[in-house]
Image (spheres, rainbow, N blue to C red):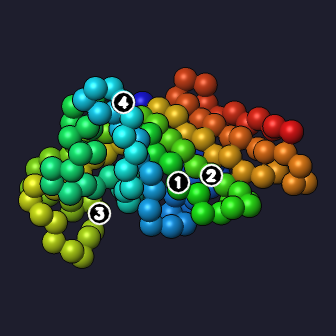
Amino acid sequence: MASWGTIATAEPKFAHAVQSVFDSHKHKVLATLRRDGSPRLSGIEATFAAGELWLGMMPNSFKAHDLLRDPRMALHSATVDVELLQGDAKLSGRAIEATGPHAWDVLNLEAEIPEESHLFRIDVSEVSLTRIGEPRDHLVIESWSEARGLRSVKRY
């Protein structure tokens, strides 16, 4: 698993493109695992700060309880770019809860955070970016994992 900063250092152009897609709009889709092992999809906001990817959650949310029980997760950029020119970003990994009185300080938020809220740092195992290539007759799928590094595939 890798921090977002590790990926950005190893593959800066790719990481910048992925982060731009995630940052292009507020809402993303988080996949977690319920107690019975079935998937749960939830809307969420994500923040890149201090070389990490962060997910904040309301107190006692189902998605927070899912991650506290089983940290495996996936995050999708919830594509609004119907032409896929900028791309469609996804990543997976494990959520690690950040605790302590100053855990939220890393995000430099203006709003006061309820004490029972949850903040998770993501250890990333895989990242992918899918977009329309040039000319617009194929897909370009770039993917990164710690084991194999960055790969690019064209699909016609």
* Front residue of this view, candidates 51 and 29: 29
Residue type for callout 4:
Ser
Question: Mark 3: which secondary structure?
Answer: helix
* N-term mark: 2 or 3: 2
Kindly identify the residue that appears in the image at 52 percent across and 54 percent down: 77
What is the distance, in whole Å, between disc 4 and disc 3 at their CAs? Answer: 31 Å
Residue 6, horizontal then vertical, whole percent:
47, 41
Q: Nearer the viewer, mark 1 or mark 4?
A: 4
Kindly identify the residue that appears in the image at 25 percent across and 55 percent down: 57
Q: Which residue is mark 2?
A: 88
Q: Which residue is mark 4?
A: 38
Q: Which residue is mark 3?
A: 107
Vertical side of 31 occupied by 59: above or below: below
Q: Are marks 2 and 1 in contact (CB under 8 Å)?
A: yes
Question: Mark 1: which secondary structure?
Answer: loop
* N-term mark: 2 or 4: 4
Residue type for callout 2:
Asp
* N-term mark: 1 or 4: 4
Question: Mark 2: which secondary structure?
Answer: strand
